[in-house]
Image (cartoon, grey):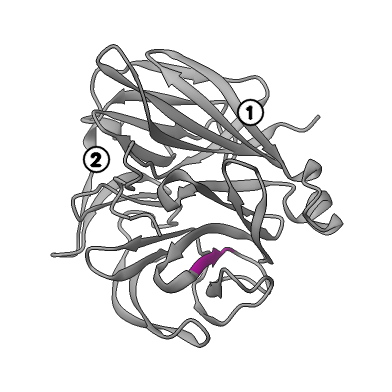
Amino acid sequence: MHPLQCLLVLAITSTAVATQAAERLYVCGDDQVREYQVQAHEATEVWRWSAAQAQDLPASYRGKLLAHIDECKPVSGGREILVTSSTGGVVLLDRASGAVLFRAQAPMAHSAELLPDGLMAVALSIDPKGDRLQLYARQRNETPLFEVPLPSGHGVVWDNAQGRLFALSHDLLQSFAVTGNRNAPALKELERWTLPGRRDGHDLSALGDGRYWVTTDDGVWRFNPQDGAFARFEPLGSSSRIKAVSVLGERMAWVEVEENWWAYGFHLANSDGGGRLCAFRSRTCTFTRCAGFVDSGGQRRDGGRPR
């Protein structure tokens, strides 16, 4: 059995235990998406989806295209999950039933996001048919409607307050306006910023206050699009090669590389980086990223919104 190359996602549920809300943790890897309920320092698996067992997927997806899932992002108020795979596929799942609502072949897909008007953005990493940002309509499988170059595309986040899409590549963070319509959408670049340090952008997520977490080859940064400044997050400055950071209320989670591009667990601490709470370890799962969460009212508290 191959180890899981996993993405970690934290999500608040409506369940309350004493004064502390229970949390949902999504872990993805190999061909699976798993949901854990997290309370205090314990995590219990409560749900699992496997591409290999999804009978509503073509054989090519069950066997290869979703063999190495690298992101699973809760959207639509946690009712749906966007899944991308570096082996070439992207799907949208119904959380309650596990049904596949959308699918597309997308070489080296590394991140996806739902946009207004039923559109979807997918970032593709290094591949002869990748290195681009694509737009799809969720009602049309396998049909990219528009694309722009995005070398080593690794992250996409829709900012509802600003009405623009942020996209992370190897050297740049860019923002785009979505133009056109559902049948003929397009992207217009608005701004671009060069990544700090050694660059090599890996993960992008919103803080919920207009700023963004950006992880690169040599640092964790908080980016402010108002002034274009990248501020190094010093509490994790002593950690090397952070793959991703996600904030959940007063907590934060991060994944730190241990071998090549994966790790054998993730860390939890207070959202200011202090008071480390625990480190989750797994013998069967190697983690790569963490991103996005929703609250009990269905709002994406990372700056997005249910769509």
Residue 12: x and y, percent?
37, 32
Q: Which mark is residue 285?
A: 1
Q: Quadrant of residue 52?
A: top right
122 in magenta: yes
Amino acid type assigned to the residue bearing label 2 in the image: Phe
Q: Is residue 177 above or below residue 54?
A: below
Residue assigned mark 2: 233
Residue 221: x and y, percent?
28, 48
Residue 278: x and y, percent?
39, 15
Identify which residue, 196 or 262, lies in the foreground.
Answer: 262
Q: Which mark is residue 297?
A: none
45 in magenta: no
- Please report the residue visible at 42 percent of the width from the left and 44 percent of the height from the top: 291
- Please report the residue visible at 68 percent of the width from the left and 24 percent of the height from the top: 284
Image quadrant where one finds the N terminus: top right
Does residue 239 appear in the picture of this structure? no
Task: Say whether residue 118 is left or right of residue 60.
Answer: left
Q: Main secondary structure of the magenta part?
A: strand
Q: Bounds of the magenta span? A: 120-125
What's the CA distance linking mark 2 and mark 1?
27 Å
Residue at disc 2, secondary structure: loop
